[in-house]
Amino acid sequence: MPGLNTLGISMVRIDYAPWGINPPHTHPRASEILTILEGCLQVGFITSSPENRHISKVLQKGDVFVFPIGLIHYQRNLDSKNAIAIAALSSQNPGVITVANAVFGSVPDISSDVLAKAFQVDKNNFSSEESKVSTPKFANYGLPRHPLVRTCSFDCKCCSGTRYNPILDFCVADTKNTVLVNGYVCKDPKTVQAEDFYASGFHIPTNTSNQLGFNALPATAAQIPGLNTFGISAARIDYAPGGIIPPHSHPRATEILIVLEGSQLEVGFVTSNPENRHITKVIGKGDVFVFPVGLIHYQRNNGSQPASGIVAFSSQNPGVHTVANVVFGSNPEIATDILAKAFQVDNNVINQIKSHF
């Protein structure tokens, strides 16, 4: 998906056979937020040395879980039925290091005596292990099913400013602390639990009985404290027939949308001055679309049935500027004569619009 280039986010669908596993691996350049679409998964990650703490949880349909950047993590299907998940990652090219492949399948090999000493076993054991993984099964990404990532064919230093520089495995938000920082103050790592990285309910449709005909269930650092400092968040969106998300922008995030249900979701964004080009498309179930950071965009369900989707943002707190509310409903108001001149209409027209906000 070339449009993701430099935007600092990507997404992948993951399918798990009965009892299938996504083996221990890391993403060196991204945190991951996983949403369960179908099935029951055991997930977990391990903190850094010396604690090496295993934080694990069993997830059901609609649950959400976060894997911190760079930490070894895994997923396992605990059911006799297939499972499906959507993973969003806070990099356009998150990278993957599958532990078994990297340690036992490197080219050239890591010396057997080095591994024997590291794992404190006889080196003959590693010779047999190396032969089993000489052809890595997860060389491209670590996950099956066509990851939506853009491979850098140029020097990517130009987009490195979107990366944060962590000094801890995680900084779980202490939402009760009143100190104001750029994000949340960290809680004591010793008190961190799996629930700090978890949310549920993404499988349950939200109530769209409102004037606009849409609703959203967010999963930001406010709802999942473990997202704090990770530069990613998500939301479930539901659209009534004819429902719209009105023109708005996210000042701090690129958005990537995948349609779960529906066949006539009109999406679009408008480029900046002087072109103001409107880029639009009608998408359906399984389709993915990207809205670049800061650009005004919208969605409309043109179908006769409800639609739903999962969105991911390249910020733990993307922010939102709904154009109509910001311009005509600010507090205090923007002077009517300013808006009349900006929109080239009579003052009475501006006042009439303001009365709705």
Image: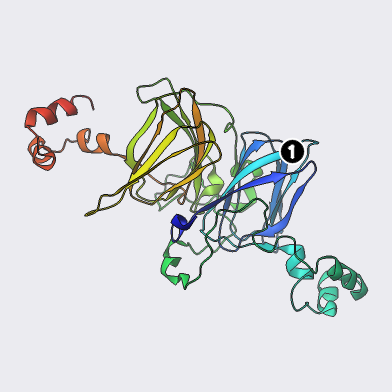
Q: Residue at x 22, y 33 (%)?
A: 329
In the picture provided, is 13 more to the left or to the right than 355?
right
Could you say which is closer to the camera, residue 193 or residue 319? 319
Q: Which residue is mark 1?
A: 82
In the picture provided, is 72 more to the left or to the right than 163?
right
Q: Quadrant of the C terminus?
A: top left
Image coordinates for residue 204, horizontal then vertical, percent = 57, 27
Image coordinates for residue 60, horizontal then vertical, percent = 68, 34
122 to 145, vertically: above or below: below
User: In this figure, what is the number of numbered marks?
Assistant: 1
Instruction: Answer with the quarter of the image where residue 244 lies.
Output: top left
Q: Residue at x 76, y 69 (%)?
A: 103
| Disc 1, SS | loop
Image coordinates for residue 128, horizontal then vertical, percent = 90, 69
In the picture provided, is 330 more to the left or to the right than 260?
left
Could you say which is closer to the camera, residue 57 or residue 160? 160
Question: Which color scheme did the rendering employ for the protein?
Answer: rainbow
Instruction: Answer with the quarter of the image where residue 72 lies.
Output: bottom right
329 to 227, vertically: above or below: above
* Any part of residue 61 in sight: yes
Could you say which is closer to the camera, residue 198 or residue 311? 311
273 to 260, vertically: above or below: below
Badge 1 local density, few (<14 within 10 Å), some, or many (20+)?
A: some
Image coordinates for residue 300, horizontal then vertical, percent = 39, 32
Q: Residue at x 27, y 38 (%)?
A: 323
Could you say which is closer to the camera, residue 338 or residue 106? 106
User: Which amino acid lies under the numbered mark 1 shown in the image of this protein?
Assistant: Asn
* Any part of residue 56 in sight: no
